[in-house]
Image (cartoon, rainbow, N blue to C red):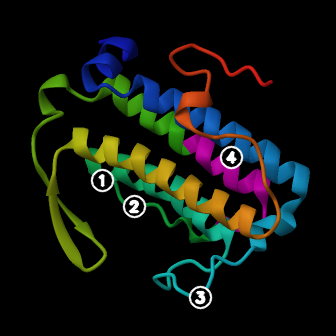
């Protein structure tokens, strides 16, 4: 089944396109400011898993990769070895996770998208369908990019609009002035 048919059936095409656009903006922005921005603190009130921006970016891409692995029954990859202070390594891992997600969307049996799976997540067990896991991975990414945007602004590193409305996804344009 062609990827476009599956994506349309799942309603994910716009989210995939948007997150790819968002990733490119962040890659360019981090390259512009230098890799030291990957060491910006996330602040004192986190959940203890991540303390700097680079770790949160690694988490974004790792989550996508691991959800694909969970859906397909593969062993989970240890992504902790990806250096959180290396922009190229981080975004290369993001490209790999996205390629794996696209392959899943092309090859996963259509009749299995809504079948519930039991998954181990940290110290909990979750029951969810592959469709829900894929939607979650994309929304999860969007949410974390917004957190990173806030960290950047709090550190004087304002930037362009990243809202879906201002993206090229689904057409339209923003004209300034």
Residue 97 placement (x, y as % from top left): 52, 44
Residue 33 placement (x, y as % from top left): 89, 56
Q: Distance between the Cα atoms at labels 3 and 2?
A: 29 Å
For the question of whether residue 24 can be seen, the reply is: yes
Q: Which residue is mark 1?
A: 70
Q: Distance between the Cα atoms at labels 1 and 4?
A: 21 Å
Q: Are marks 3 and 2 in contact (CB under 8 Å)?
A: no
Number of callouts: 4
Determine which quarter of the picture holds residue 165: top right
Q: Tell me if mark 2 has few (under 14), some (14-19) or many (20+) residues whose alpha carbon lies within 10 angstroms of its own.
A: few
Labels 3 and 1: the sequence-earlier one: 3
- Residue closest to the eye, 95 or 142: 142
- Number of the front mark, 4 or 2: 4
Residue 25 placement (x, y as % from top left): 72, 40
- Number of the front mark, 3 or 1: 3
Q: Distance between the Cα atoms at labels 4 and 3?
A: 29 Å
Q: Which residue is mark 4?
A: 92
- Residue closest to the eye, 168 or 118: 168
Residue 155 placement (x, y as % from top left): 79, 70
Labels 1 and 4: the sequence-earlier one: 1
Q: Which residue is mark 2?
A: 76
Q: Are marks 2 and 1 in contact (CB under 8 Å)?
A: yes
Labels 4 and 3: the sequence-earlier one: 3
Point out the stretch of residues depicted in magenta: 82-96
Residue 94 included in the magenta stretch of the image: yes
Q: Are marks 1 and 4 in contact (CB under 8 Å)?
A: no
Give the residue displayed 16% in from the left and 52% down from the top.
128
Reply above or below: 88 against 76. Answer: above
Q: Distance between the Cα atoms at labels 4 and 2?
A: 18 Å
Secondary structure category for the residue under label 2: loop
Q: Which residue is mark 3?
A: 44
């Amino acid at each position: 089944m062609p990827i476009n048919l599956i994506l349309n059936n799942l309603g994910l095409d716009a989210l995939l396109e948007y997150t790819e656009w968002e990733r490119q903006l962040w890659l360019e922005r981090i390259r512009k400011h230098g890799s030291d921005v990957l060491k910006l603190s996330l602040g004192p009130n986190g959940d203890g898993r991540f303390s700097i921006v680079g770790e949160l970016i690694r988490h974004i891409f790792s989550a996508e990769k691991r959800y694909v692995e969970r859906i397909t029954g593969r062993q989970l990859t240890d992504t902790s070895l990806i250096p959180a202070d290396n922009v190229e390594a981080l975004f290369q891992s993001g490209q790999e996770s996205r390629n794996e997600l696209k392959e899943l969307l092309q090859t996963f049996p259509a009749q299995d998208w809504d079948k519930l799976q039991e998954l181990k997540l940290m110290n909990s067990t979750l029951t969810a369908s592959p469709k829900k896991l894929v939607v979650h991975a994309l929304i999860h990414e969007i949410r974390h990019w917004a957190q990173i945007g806030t960290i950047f602004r709090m550190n004087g590193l304002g930037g362009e609009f990243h809202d879906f409305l201002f993206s090229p996804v689904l057409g339209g344009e923003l004209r300034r002035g």
